[in-house]
Amino acid sequence: MALYVQKFGGTSVGSVERIKAVAEKVKTFRNQGHQVVVVVSAMSGETNRLIQLASEINDDPTPREMDMLVSTGEQVTISLLAMALQKTGVPATSYTGAQVGILTDSAHTKARIQRIETDELRQDLDNGKVVVVAGFQGVDDDGNITTLGRGGSDTTGVALAAALNADECQIYTDVDGVYTTDPRVCSRARRLDSITVEEMLEMASSGSKVLQIRAVEFAGKYKVPLRVLSSFAEGQGTLIVADDQEDERNMEEPLISGIAFNTNEAKLTVLNTPDVPGVASKILGPIADANIEVDMIVQNVAPAGDYTDFTFTVSKADYRQTKRILEESIVPSLGGGEVRGDDQIAKVSLVGVGMRSHAGVASRMFRVLADEGINIRMVSTSEIKISVVIDEKFMELAVRALHTAFGLDREDVNEET
């Protein structure tokens, strides 16, 4: 008997029929003698609907009230799935994040899990029940409902798997695994049988929507076996393997495992800031204090050496708030110049452990983009990733060109996309 934590996303539970199908899939595992914890998202489109309702009432609602509102989406799904399981003869109990004991900090809309109380959950499992848990949410020490950010149900699933020492965490979604890039952008994308945690982290941080980055971090930190599967088709999916299992994969690793992209970024530049020690901290400190995550950073020193232009990227959702912080408090205190922003950019990233042993990846990437007439506006690198910022309108062209240039194309589809 094994213990599985199975997470089903919004499209997997997007209708009554699909919820019934999930119940049948879960029943199959239980009938095989396994213990099952199911984590579900809100029905597809529901969270967006709730956010739209909020915007019609108040264009600047408090984060606490937003958490109170959007957490209701998962509550609907868990109760419906528990009912569907009971209808098939499977005993099941639904829990909100607070009820199951997912305790978080108080950073509303971006909360982080601090601990999970598992005693009641284990008791239900030992009594033969399937436990259905609301993803994406928890509770802080003051009893306030919190949410983990968009895509947080993945994190809930992996965190529960870690807390329960589950045999495997299975993420069911509308795709049948992790692909070399998004098949909707490049029809020649290939499904990967396996990918390392390190590669998946880079893919997720660079814009891959298959898994939330915090979920992958949990899997890597707590050695949770993680598999991505389709809710709608049979198959083995993609196994996310620990970095120390990398040698168990194919002996000849590809140079590049995948290409990720992200159009949900914005670029901000503070012009003519004094080129003195501590400037970067003075700029980014208040941004961090506002709980805004910064991605890429570039600092250009002027020829005279007295001033510098400081450029960084944030998510589009944080763009206006970041710009306001820069203009109202940071720039006046620094005596810097104007703040320029651009929210029509995209980040495209090459990811692969093969970069460790191969030179010339960056120059080859830049040459491919240049041949397509695509200008590079920012560059950042890690040991196994190269990211560039380009104009958003060129994103799909860049992904397809790079996918072909680095030999990732499938051979069983037409050239046209």
Image: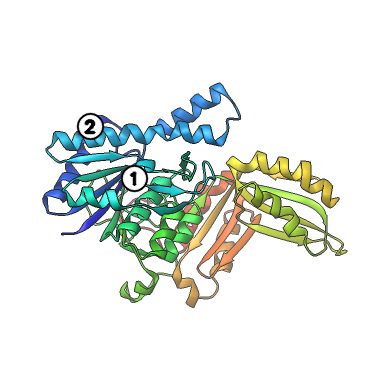
Q: Which residue is mark 1?
A: 100
Pointer 1 local density, CA inside 10 Å: few below 14, some 14–19, many at least 20 = many
Q: Is residue 259 left or right of residue 27?
A: right
Q: Residues within 10 Å of mark 2 (few under 14, many from 20)?
A: few
- Residue at position x 53%, y 53% in the image: 398
User: Residue 142, how many percent across, how many down?
Assistant: 49, 42
Q: Position of residue 37 (x, y in %)?
A: 26, 49
Q: Give residue 23's position: percent from left, percent from top.
A: 20, 40
- Front residue of this view, candidates 349 and 92: 92
Q: Nearer the viewer, residue 229 or 169?
A: 169
Q: Mark 1 falls on what kind of element?
A: helix
Q: CA distance from mark 2 to mark 1?
A: 26 Å
Q: Residue at x 73, y 53 (%)?
A: 283
Residue 194 has which mark?
none
Q: Nearer the viewer, residue 305 or 378?
A: 305
Identify the residue at image location x=38%, y=49%.
Answer: 156
Q: Is residue 90 visible?
A: yes
Residue 321 placement, left or right of 257: right
Judged left or right of residue 364, residue 2 is left
Residue underneath mark 2: 17
Is 214 situated above or below 263?
below
Q: Quadrant of residue 22?
A: top left
Amino acid at dot 2: Glu
